Amino acid sequence: MADAAAALHPDVAACGITVRRGRRALSVGSSDPLSQVADELQYDEEEGPCLESLVHGVVVVVDDYARESRWGVYPARVAEHGLRSSLSLPLAPAGRPVGALNAYGTRPGMFAGALRDDLAAFAARAQKVVAVALRHAEQAEMVDHLHAAMESRSAIDQALGILMAQQRCTADEAFALLRRASQGRNRKVADLAADIVASVSGGPPRTGRFTP
């Protein structure tokens, strides 16, 4: 997607796509190492046109980094890499900013008129693709968390069965033993349970396979 945006005009030196994941900004696409550097400098400084566009959902134009006074030391740092102007466009499907399209130029005053309009139209189309990609990523994370929870639960259940057989106690008593051991050794209950299972079976706890 960043490559397609950069190809809109030969004067566009580089384009990057930034998205927000939780409280972090991440680069998910770059047409050139220059855009990766320019975007990540903003993440380091925690300010810049890309982040302003992402956070506030506004279009941010920089006509000349050599004369720019916003965002602390960022303009001077990005100008050291030969970039002089930029355009940051919010990616805001349903009115909620989730990312930004960042275009960079090596000459001042590049992002006006037809080029700015073309990039804005591209961003309007791209935001739908980004929204779908983020939704899939969130669903994948949820599945990963569910897998981890199921594995922990399975290990604990198996360890409780072992302790009940060894100590001839109830499930509540076995869990109390496991919890005291966890606290005494400063380890997670699930990790200690996995060790108990491995010590008896010679392998890791068996887990059911979950397929979404």
Image: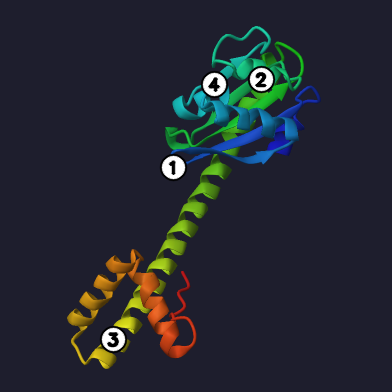
- Mark 4 or 1, closer to the camera: 1
Amino acid type of the residue tagged 3 in the rendering: Leu
Q: Amino acid at mark 4?
A: Val
Outermost residue, front direction?
A: 184
Q: In the rendering, which numbered label is found on residue 77?
A: 2
Quarter-of-image position of residue 22:
top left
- The residue where tag 4 is placed is 59
| Circles 3, 1 touching at the beta carbon (< 8 Å) | no
Tell us which disc is closer to us: 3 or 2. Answer: 3
Please rate how many residues cluster around mark 2, counting C-alpha atoms within 10 Å: few if below 14, some from 14 to 19, many from 20: some
Residue 4, position as x, y percentages in the image = 72, 37
**Residue 9 placed where, x, y %?**
77, 26
Cα–Cα gap, marks 3 and 2: 61 Å
Q: Secondary structure at mark 4?
A: loop
Label 4–label 1 contact, CB within 8 A: no
Residue topped by disc 3: 163
Q: Choose the circle earlier in sequence order: 3 or 2.
A: 2
Q: Residues within 10 Å of mark 3 (few under 14, many from 20)?
A: many
Along the line of sight, the residue nearer the viewer: 198 or 136? 198
* Residue at the spot 47% in from the left edge and 53% down from the top edge: 138
Task: Say which amino acid is labelled 2.
Answer: Arg
